Image (cartoon, rainbow, N blue to C red):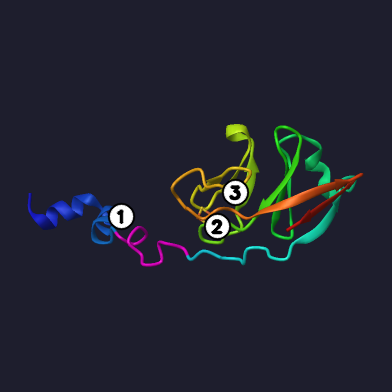
């Protein structure tokens, strides 16, 4: 079959796909620029555990986000806190998940951290910043 005749049989859309295969995948913008944040510093605030914002902390495995800190009730029922800003590339995607006994995980590239901030995979060697917690009645203090 002649080239011209062959292209005609493909139709317009197929010819476009053959001519411009890289429109999406080969774009120089393919790797989106990450929005980054500073790791929280000088943290010292309280959370009223009876307030609506703290409702997820009533259950083991629940967590809330406040002031770029992830505050979680771990699977043993203790209140723990870590930076919401990842130690890998400073996105604010760190959350508490109930896998592997309860860990912090960043969804941007999949870094996983123990509750003491130790990296659990090879995505980063930088520990996740961990904060102290202190419970006084129904008031939780989160501090450095
Ligand atoms: S920024 Fe968190 S894993 Fe890369």
Task: Say which quadrant the C terminus sits in.
Answer: bottom right
> Answer yes or no: do the residues labelled 3 and 2 have beta carbons within 8 Å?
yes
Q: Is residue 143 left or right of residue 93?
A: right
Q: Earlier in the sequence, mark 3 or mark 1?
A: 1
Q: Which residues are magenta?
A: 22-32
**Magenta span dominant secondary structure:** loop
Residue 56 point in image, percent of width and height:
78, 42
Judged from the image, the secondary structure of the residue bearing numbered disc 2 is loop
Q: Is label 1 within 8 A of ligand 1 (CB to nearest ligand atom)?
A: no
Q: Which residue is mark 3?
A: 117
Q: Position of residue 135 (x, y in %)?
A: 85, 46
What kind of element bears circle 3?
loop
Q: CA distance from mark 3 to mark 1?
A: 52 Å
**Tag 1: Cα neighbours inside 10 Å, few (<14), some, or many (≥20)?**
few
Label 3 and label 2: CA atoms lie apart by: 9 Å
Q: Quadrant of residue 97?
A: top right
Q: Where is mark 1, residue-wise?
A: 13
Q: Where does the image place residue 92, in percent across and percent down from the top left?
A: 61, 58
For the residues carrying marks 1 and 2, which lies nearer the camera in this image?
A: 2
- Which residue is under mark 2? 87
> 32 and 97: which one is in front?
97
């Amino acid at each position: 079959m002649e080239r011209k005749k062959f292209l005609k049989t493909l139709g317009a859309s197929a010819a476009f796909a053959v001519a411009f295969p890289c429109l999406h995948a080969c774009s120089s913008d393919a790797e989106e620029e990450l929005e980054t944040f500073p790791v929280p510093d000088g943290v010292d605030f309280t959370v009223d555990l009876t307030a609506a914002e703290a409702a997820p902390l009533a259950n083991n495995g629940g967590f809330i986000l406040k002031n770029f800190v992830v505050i979680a009730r771990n699977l043993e029922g203790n209140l723990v806190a870590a930076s919401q800003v990842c130690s890998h590339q400073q996105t604010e995607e760190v959350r508490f998940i109930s896998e592997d006994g309860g860990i912090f995980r960043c969804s941007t590239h999949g870094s996983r951290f123990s509750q003491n901030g130790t990296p659990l995979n090879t995505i980063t060697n930088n520990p996740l910043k961990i904060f102290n917690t202190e419970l006084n009645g129904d008031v939780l203090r989160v501090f450095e």
